[in-house]
Amino acid sequence: MSLTSDDLADVKQLMESVLSGHAAEINKRFDDVNKRLDGVDERLDGMDKRFDSINKRLDGMDERFDDINERLGSIDKRLDENEEIQNEILNAIGIDLNRHSARLDDYEDRLKKLERGVA
């Protein structure tokens, strides 16, 4: 059996319609995928905005922490200076403490002698 040119034209038209149908289905699927990807892009844009605002807040917190660290550094410095002064005072007291203790013991002995002498 041989095909006529009309038969070949019909086969060609049938193949074109099948391909056109498949192409339309593929295009529809691509459109759906593109819509979904657009939705994902919108969500990601929203997330980017949120992260940007979070980053700004964290930058503000970093600045505050830097200020706090500076204050704590100056407080530590003052505490170290005060500790040095206290150590000097305690050393001065410790040096004179033995002398004062001996002097108090001497006064106590004198008072006891005076009490015995009066009695």
Image (spheres, helix red, strand yellow):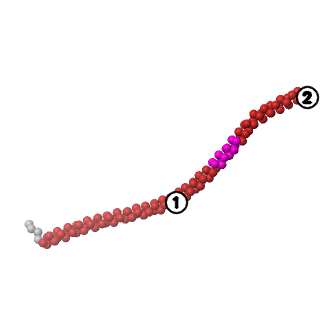
**Whether residue 101 is situated above or below residue 80 in the rendered picture:** above
**x then y, percent, for residue 50:** 48, 60
The total number of labels drawn is 2
**x then y, percent, for residue 20:** 24, 68
Mark seen at residue 118: 2
Which of the two discs, 1 and 2, sits closer to the camera?
A: 2
Q: Residue 80 lies in magenta, yes or no?
A: yes
Name the secondary structure under disc 1: helix
- Residue range corresponding to the magenta coloring: 76-88
Identify the image quadrant of the N terminus: bottom left
Going from N to C along the chain, the mark reached first, 1 or 2, is 1
Q: Are marks 1 and 2 in contact (CB under 8 Å)?
A: no
Name which residue type carries label 2.
Val
Side of 64 relative to 108 (left or right): left
Q: CA distance from mark 1 to mark 2?
A: 87 Å
Question: Which residue is located at x 69 percent, y 44 percent?
Answer: 85
**x then y, percent, for residue 107:** 83, 32
Question: Which residue is located at x 63 percent, y 48 percent?
Answer: 76
**Whether residue 21 is situated above or below residue 87 in the rendered picture:** below
Question: Which residue is located at x 70 percent, y 42 percent?
Answer: 88
Q: Residue 84 lies in magenta, yes or no?
A: yes
State the residue position of label 1: 56
**Whether residue 20 is situated above or below residue 93 in the rendered picture:** below
Name which residue type carries label 1.
Lys
**x then y, percent, for residue 100:** 78, 35
Name the secondary structure under disc 2: helix
Q: Nearer the viewer, residue 68 or 12?
A: 68
Please tell me in which quadrant of the rendered image residue 25 appears.
bottom left
Question: Which residue is located at x 86 percent, y 28 percent?
Answer: 113
> Is the magenta region chiefly helix, strand or loop?
helix
